[in-house]
Amino acid sequence: MAPVLELLYNILDDLKQENLKRFRSLLQQDGRIGAGKLENADVTDTVDKMVDSYGPEEAVEITMNILRRINQNQLALDLENKYKEVLNSLEASEKHTRKQEDFWLQELLKTHKKNMKEKVRNTFLMKKRKKRVHLTDAYTDLFITEGDINEVNHEHEILKIDNAFKPQKSQDRPIKCNDVFSLNKKKKKIVLTKGIAGIGKTISVHKFILDWTEGKANQDIDFVFLLPLRKINCIKDREINLHEILQIFNPELQGLETLKRNKIYSYKLALIFDGLDESGLTLDFDSGMVACVEERSSVDQLFSSLVNGTLLPSALVWVTSRPAAANQIPPEYVGLFTEVRGFTDQQKEEYFRKRIKDET
């Protein structure tokens, strides 16, 4: 707005006193500037009142029209040409700002993806050789199916362990871990994945993240944050905000100025909470909801607020859990409920062939 104000000041300064008086009189006839407010106004007051009443763009249009009506055609032409120059300058400045912002964001995303890749790529540990194995070299698709969240409250984990080793039902439709968010048609609700201990929930999460970092899937998501609930236990008894939690697990977010920090939360985010059964959280969905990433509260309340959509309602949320703890999340907050069922016979053979290179 400042360049437009300066331009209007300079143009009206070139008017003689009698022409300025006629200008104010014609401006007054429009009626949007209160009667008497322009009677003894100088150039500065006249321009300020115009911009306040009409906004900068319309103030320029009205000024050009009135100048032509009082036969100041050259001044009207000067104003038109100089206003175009101002607009071009502002547009160039905005482009430069956007370019700087895009560069900053791309650098942050590059660092974030690199760090996330390092977290998940070497998942398997060969204990005898003390050598880590790249996730891609050993990963085999697990048998993941869509289930009914309402059944969770009626099952026991021992029964689930028993069922996991029974032949899979032919009518169960397998789901790939990369598709959990795209299959969730209720975008404002979370994805909840259950499975017995050691069945492959964490491996599925890590494969989802690895494929995202390598550009193989879910490229519509800008940031993916992995939050192992077992590690969050050490901070669950203190007041903290969501951004501080994310900083603990993502050092690249530390030290960002407020404007840049807020910018991150306007992008498409996916938050993955792995291992609800290991968290020890006491969840209460009826009170103490948090609506701002900067608002400090207990981890319980922050997690509950993310699950019910009060906090970051546009974010994608995925929670994994053993069956016994999955019933802590009310069914009305779950858009897609999946179950990791382990390997089919064919997947078992594929897995062992990947892990054991020696045919003998």
Image (cartoon, helix red, strand yellow):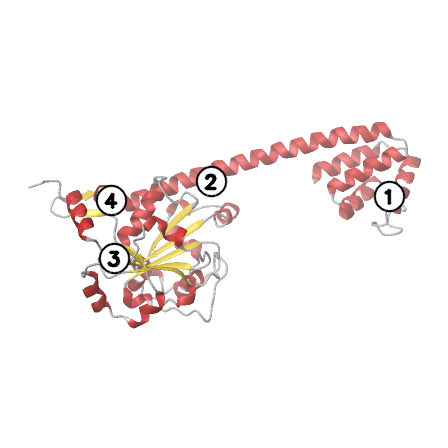
**Amino acid bearing label 1:** Leu
Residue pointed to by mark 1: 27
Q: Earlier in the sequence, mark 4 or mark 2?
A: 2
**Amino acid bearing label 2:** Leu
Distance CA(mark 4)–CA(mark 2): 28 Å
Distance CA(mark 4)–CA(mark 1): 73 Å
Q: Which mark is residue 135?
A: 4
Q: Is residue 324 left or right of residue 36?
A: left
- On the image, the x and y values in percent for residue 119 come to 30, 46
Residue pointed to by mark 2: 105
Q: Earlier in the sequence, mark 4 or mark 1?
A: 1
**Amino acid bearing label 3:** Ser
- Give the vertical position of 146 relative to 97 (above or below): below
Under circle 2, the secondary element is: helix
Under circle 1, the secondary element is: helix
**Amino acid bearing label 4:** Leu
Under circle 3, the secondary element is: loop
Outermost residue to the left: 360
Distance CA(mark 1)–CA(mark 2): 46 Å
Residue drawn 83% across the image and 50% down it: 32
- Give the vertical position of 70 relative to 38 (above or below): above
- On the image, the x and y values in percent for residue 223 come to 42, 46
Residue drawn 41% across the image and 59% down it: 190
Outermost residue to the front: 171
